[in-house]
Image (cartoon, rainbow, N blue to C red):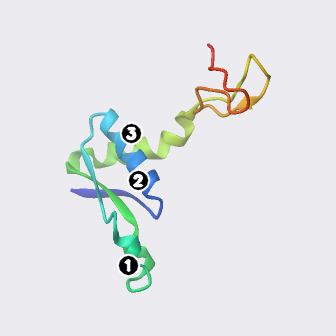
């Protein structure tokens, strides 16, 4: 096993795990509940961590996670109201219309 990512943002760590799992890389999240010990333990020790189960997947996992922000795509304009929405949204936040195209 090898650690490939850590963050105080638990949602970000689980998102990273989901990205790896989608690529066939098995991974586990550790230290999920240590944030409650911050203050008693050094903050760096309380970060949630993502570990790949196979050492041979570690390099590929690190590359995938490094490239993940670039894979988000382009912003889009709502055809109904013209609002510019970020790529991760499938529905306009302003009027609720679904993304087309």
The x and y percentages for residue 59 are 33, 47
Q: Which residue is mark 1?
A: 37
Q: Quadrant of the N terminus?
A: bottom left
User: Residue 78 location, x and y as percent?
Assistant: 73, 22
Residue at coordinates 34% horizontally, 41% vertically from top-left? Answer: 20
Q: Badge 3 is on which residue?
A: 19
Say which mark, if any, is on residue 47.
none
Q: Secondary structure at mark 2?
A: helix
User: Up-down: is 95 above or below 61?
Assistant: above
Q: Earlier in the sequence, mark 1 or mark 2?
A: 2
How far apart are the alpha carbons under marks 3 and 1?
Answer: 28 Å
The residue at which mark 2 appears reads as: 13
Identify the residue at image location x=62%, y=31%. Answer: 87
Is residue 57 rendered to the left or right of residue 85?
left
Instruction: Point out residue 40 in the picture as x, y percentages from the top left corner.
Output: 39, 86
- Which residue is rendered at x = 42% and y = 75% of the image? 44
Q: Is residue 63 left or right of residue 55?
A: right
**Image location (x, y in percent) of residue 21:** 30, 38
Residue 34 figure quarter: bottom left
**Crowd around label 1: few <14 · some 14–19 · many ≥20 (10 Å):** few
| Residue in the image at 42% along x and 79% along y | 38
Q: From the viewer's side, name the closer residue of 42 and 98.
A: 98
| CB atoms of marks 3 and 1 within 8 Å | no
Secondary structure beneath dot 3 equals: helix
Marks 3 and 1: which is nearer the front? Answer: 1
Q: What is the residue that sits farthest to the top in this orientation? A: 101
77 w.r.t. 57: above or below:
above
Q: Earlier in the sequence, mark 3 or mark 2?
A: 2
């Amino acid at each position: 096993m090898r650690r490939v990512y850590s963050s105080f943002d638990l949602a970000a760590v689980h998102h990273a795990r989901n990205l790896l799992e989608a690529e066939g890389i098995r991974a586990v999240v550790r230290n999920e509940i240590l944030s409650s010990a911050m203050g008693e333990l050094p903050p760096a020790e309380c970060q949630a961590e993502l570990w790949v189960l196979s050492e041979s997947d570690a390099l590929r996992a690190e590359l995938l996670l490094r490239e993940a922000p670039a894979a988000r795509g382009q912003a889009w304009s709502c055809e109904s109201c013209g609002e510019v929405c970020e790529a991760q949204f499938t529905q306009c936040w302003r009027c609720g219309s679904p993304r087309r195209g």
